[in-house]
Amino acid sequence: MSYLLTTLIDVDKCIFMNTDNDLLMTIAKETSRLIGKDFLERLVNILRNHMNAIMVVLTERPDPNSTIAKTILARVGDQPVENFEYDLVGTPCEAVYQGRTFVVANDLSVKFDVDKNRISYIGVPVFENDKVFAHLAVISDKPLTNPEMAESIIQIFAGRAEAEIRRIKYDREKDSLLQELEKANKRMTSNYQKLRAINEYKTQILGMVAHDLKNPLGQVL
């Protein structure tokens, strides 16, 4: 996954990024205490608020053989977007899901069939077991003046974002396993109680039989 922060100097012309240290310090400060979904939500908000981004999309592709991606988190303008799916074919995101960071500094709408107000694009793949399972894309209506710098900063924070996505996935798996364990424990407890009741009944029956046979057996002997 990835991060990208920018300071707008001339919003009518371009996006100009602040110095490396300022940018890295800002990202670190904004996200240092966050993990999991909170971290990813702050990431999307940072990208939206500190970069002239008209769209920030964090997606996943559950089926690696499919061309359909769905959003994990997204903001279009000031509005959050949930449960949105789209076809990767013919989009710049398709190149990212092929396993590489993809940057279009200008004229995005000329190179791809997208809205004319989408000028620049940066997309970073997220890997699991050497396969792309998610990606982060930042789209702006202004050109990037320093795409290499933007890409470098994204790559610095890509590992952290990847780790948090995996954390969410593993937490879900852990919760699922705990639920299954709880169900199994309840079944075992129920079976134990049934067996205990059966054993107590058997003991009671044997006691009754032994008592009832005591005198007849005595006479026989």
Image: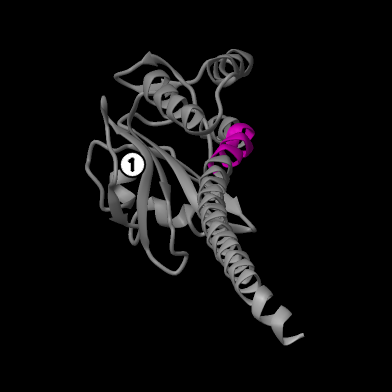
Say which of 130 and 39 sits in front: 39
Task: Pick out the residue farthest to the bottom.
Answer: 220
Residue 81, image quadrant = top left
Q: Which residue is mark 1?
A: 107
12 up-or-down from 168: above or below? above
Q: Is residue 57 magenta?
A: no
Residue displayed at 63% across by 32% down: 156
Amino acid of disc 1 = Asp
Residue displayed at 50% across by 20% down: 17
Residue displayed at 36% across by 45% down: 71
Determine whether, in the image, residue 120 is placed left or right of residue 20: left
| Magenta highlight range | 156-165
- Number of marks present in the image shown: 1
- Report crowding for label 1: few under 14, some 14 to 19, many 20 or more residues within 10 A (C-alpha): some
The quadrant of the picture occupied by the C terminus is bottom right
**Residue 132 drawn at (x, y percent):** 54, 56
Determine whether, in the image, residue 134 is placed left or right of residue 210: left
State how the image is colored.
one colour
Residue 109, image quadrant = top left
Q: Is residue 152 visible?
A: no
184 up-or-down from 82: above or below? below
Residue 29, image quadrant = top right
Report the magenta stretch's main SS. helix
Task: Pick out the residue farthest to the right.
Answer: 221
217 up-or-down from 15: above or below? below
Element carrying mark 1: loop
Q: Is residue 52 visible?
A: yes
Say which of 39 and 98 sits in front: 39
**Residue 211 drawn at (x, y percent):** 63, 69
Say which of 187 and 58 sits in front: 187
Residue displayed at 40% across by 24% down: 45
